[in-house]
Structure formats: structure tokens, C-alpha cells
């Protein structure tokens, strides 16, 4: 065939006519384009696979982060519950008994201060007297004893309100991280100075 090229001949380029050169150039260009397209396709496939893998890893990290957050919240709630008192069989406790039920026991005077800080007791010196609203809603009750009135507190309602106040004011983590009575008393006294005495 006149248009056939003898590629075994080292001088085949010199023997090519114009039509053969154009044909060879077209073949080479088509091959190069085919290789380029294959390379681009491979790159797109790699990028797509990597994107899928990265998206899966991101999703896994989101799930793991959410799980860790939930675990942390559960651990914090457990820690808070450790400090809480279970309701007595009568439902109400004296300040002394209420404070004794904490993991780090709180004396009645310090607990009285805390109740004044969070707004459950009247902010006066001396006796810890609940606001009338706290008696009406069952957080506390008055119990006449001889010639004076004795107050008792519902542990669950009282702790709920203390926790709510501590959380709203940013003290809850600090409060429940106190490991000794001295630390707890120091914190309660500081809160008392800030919120009651000032």
C-alpha cells in the first residue's frame, strides 16, 4: 500500500509524504488526547474516591464527637447526682439533713447561705426562712415546733432550683468540682458576698 509506513526503517520519517505525515500526526494527537482523557478520568476517580472517604471520615468524626459530648454530659449529670440527696421517705428534710446528704457534706449554715444566694430563702441574717412562694410550691414547708416554726426542704425541688441557678449563672461546674468542705464553703461564702451582702 502506498500509504503504509515502514516503521522498521530508521529513516521512515524522511520517506513520508505529506498525507502520511498528517495521518501520523492525527494518530499521535488522537493517542495523546486519549491518554490525557484517561489520566483526567483516573484523577477524577481518585478525587471522587478521596472526597467520599473524607466525607465518610467527617461524618464519622461528627458522630464520634456527638457521642463524646453525650458521654461527657452523662458523666457530668452522674457527678451531679452523686452530690444530690435522695428524697427521704417523708419527702422533706431539715437543712442539717439536706446538707449531710451531699457527697461533700454542707453544714446547715452554709446551706442556708446557698439557699439565700439562689433566692429560695429570705436574705436576712440568722435563721434560714423560705420565701412564702417556696412554701406554696412545695419546695419547703413550715412545721410548728413548740414555740417556734421549723422549716423543712424538699430535696429534689430544692436541688433542682439550686442547679438551675448555678447553671444560669455559670457556677455549676465549679460547684460540683469542689472536693473538700473548705473548697465548697469558700465558694458558697464568695457567692454570698456577691449576691446577698452586696
Image: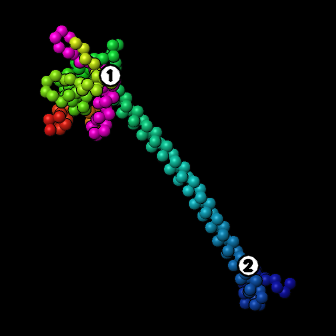
Task: Identify the image quadrant of residue 193.
Answer: top left
Magenta stretch encompasses residue 167: yes
Q: Classify mark 1: helix, strand or loop.
A: loop
Image coords of residue 2 (percent x, y): 84, 87
Image coords of residue 38 (percent x, y): 66, 67
Image coords of residue 20 (percent x, y): 77, 86
Task: Identify the image quadrant of residue 73.
Answer: top left
Task: Identify the image quadrant of residue 27.
Answer: bottom right
Q: Which quadrant: the N terminus?
A: bottom right
Q: Classify mark 2: helix, strand or loop.
A: helix
Which label was assigned to residue 138? 1
- Is 178 on the left-hand or right-hand side of 41? left
**Of the residues under marks 1 and 2, which one precedes in the sequence?**
2
Q: Residues within 10 Å of mark 2 (few under 14, many from 20)?
A: few
Q: What span is in magenta?
A: 145-171
Q: Which quadrant: the C terminus?
A: top left
Which label was assigned to residue 27? 2
Image coords of residue 15 (percent x, y): 76, 89
Q: At x 31% / y 39%, what residue is drawn? A: 168
**Position of 148 relative to 183 (above/below):** above
Q: At x 56% / y 56%, what residue is drawn? A: 51
Amino acid at each position: 500500500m502506498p500509504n503504509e509506513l515502514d516503521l522498521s526503517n530508521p529513516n521512515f520519517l524522511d520517506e513520508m509524504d505529506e498525507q502520511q505525515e498528517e495521518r501520523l500526526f492525527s494518530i499521535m494527537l488522537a493517542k495523546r488526547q486519549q491518554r490525557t482523557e484517561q489520566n483526567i478520568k483516573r484523577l477524577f476517580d481518585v478525587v471522587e474516591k478521596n472526597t467520599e472517604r473524607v466525607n465518610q471520615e467527617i461524618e464519622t468524626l461528627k458522630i464520634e464527637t456527638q457521642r463524646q459530648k453525650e458521654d461527657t454530659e452523662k458523666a457530668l449529670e452522674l457527678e451531679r447526682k452523686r452530690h444530690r440527696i435522695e428524697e427521704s421517705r417523708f419527702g422533706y428534710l431539715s437543712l442539717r439533713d439536706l446538707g449531710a446528704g451531699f457527697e461533700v457534706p454542707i453544714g446547715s449554715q452554709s446551706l442556708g447561705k446557698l439557699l439565700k444566694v439562689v433566692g429560695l430563702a429570705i436574705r436576712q441574717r440568722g435563721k434560714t426562712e423560705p420565701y412564702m412562694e417556696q412554701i406554696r410550691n412545695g419546695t419547703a414547708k413550715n412545721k410548728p415546733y413548740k414555740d417556734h416554726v421549723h422549716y423543712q426542704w424538699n430535696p429534689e425541688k430544692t436541688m433542682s432550683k439550686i442547679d438551675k441557678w448555678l447553671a444560669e449563672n455559670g457556677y455549676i461546674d465549679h460547684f460540683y468540682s469542689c472536693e473538700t468542705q473548705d473548697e465548697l464553703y469558700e465558694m458558697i461564702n464568695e457567692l454570698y458576698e456577691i449576691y446577698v451582702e452586696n
